[in-house]
Amino acid sequence: MPTPRKLAFIHTSHVLIPLFTQLAKEHLPGVETFHMTDESLIKNTIAAGELTANTIRRVAAMIGLAHDGGADVVMVTCSSIGRATALARSQYDFPVLRIDEALAEKAIAMGGRIGVAATLGTTLEPTLDLLRETAAKASREMELIPALAVGAFEAVIAGDIATHDKLLLSTLSELTGRVDVVVLAQASMARVAAQLPEGGPPILASPELAMRQAKEVLETYRGR
């Protein structure tokens, strides 16, 4: 009997564990999963205002530990530290997935004016960079319209979910009137975006798209 495939998730917040546990059940039947969380990765990135070399090395090391723990494939679920996957891919011979890569590919394929919403500048900028890189590789033309929900992240950290949702909804409502498609830079934003009225432009969130990508990779990878 073949050994079940294993997928590890690298998080910077424990709040995403239930979401990805449920998505794995829906999209990856028969695949074993486990979660590793280090909140200091995102806290240090926010404090520095950028993804530092030290944090990149730590993320890569954590990915290696996930593989040592039995994972065939590792997914980094935080867009703010997504660029660290490049170092991991240069060091390891197993698949390392970045949560927003499939999202960027789909958004670029749709083209036109792409709105990018975030509650953190350290997430917004890497997402914009990824979209530009993806467009360049695909030789596609597009226009990026960034939108930062100022104060929303601080509100949720303080436990004020209502204020977070209100600020984010306001930002999303204004953005949807200006673009052809909206990209949510953070996995946690999908819950709030679902509250928008129907009839607006398509809104793309990373979790579902990333899980479909993980399924394809797990079905073809036979490294262990």
Image: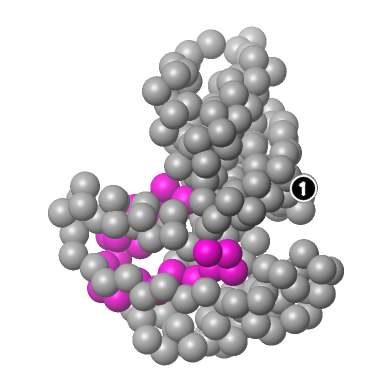
- Residue 2 position in % (x across, y down): 60, 13
Let me know if residue 121 appears in the view.
Answer: yes
| Residue, far left | 139
- Residue 115 position in % (x across, y down): 40, 74
In the visual, does 18 lie left or right of 94?
right
- Residue 67 position in % (x across, y down): 61, 19
Coloring applied to the structure:
one colour
Q: Is residue 109 magenta?
A: yes
Q: Which residue is mark 1?
A: 14
What are the residue bounds of the magenta stretch?
99-121
What amino acid type should be assigned to the residue bearing mark 1?
A: His
Out of 63 and 42, give the one closest to the viewer.
42
Out of 42 and 30, give the one closest to the viewer.
42
| Residue, far front | 48
User: What residue do we see at 36% from left, 55% from top?
Assistant: 129
- Residue 197 position in % (x across, y down): 57, 87
* Quarter of the image where one finds residue 160: bottom right
User: What crowding class fits label 1: few (fewer than 14 Cα within 10 Å), some (14-19), or many (20 or more)?
Assistant: few
User: What residue do we see at 40% from left, 23% from top?
Assistant: 90
User: What residue do we see at 73% from left, 39% from top?
Assistant: 37
| Secondary structure category for the residue under label 1 | helix
The total of numbered circles placed on residues is 1
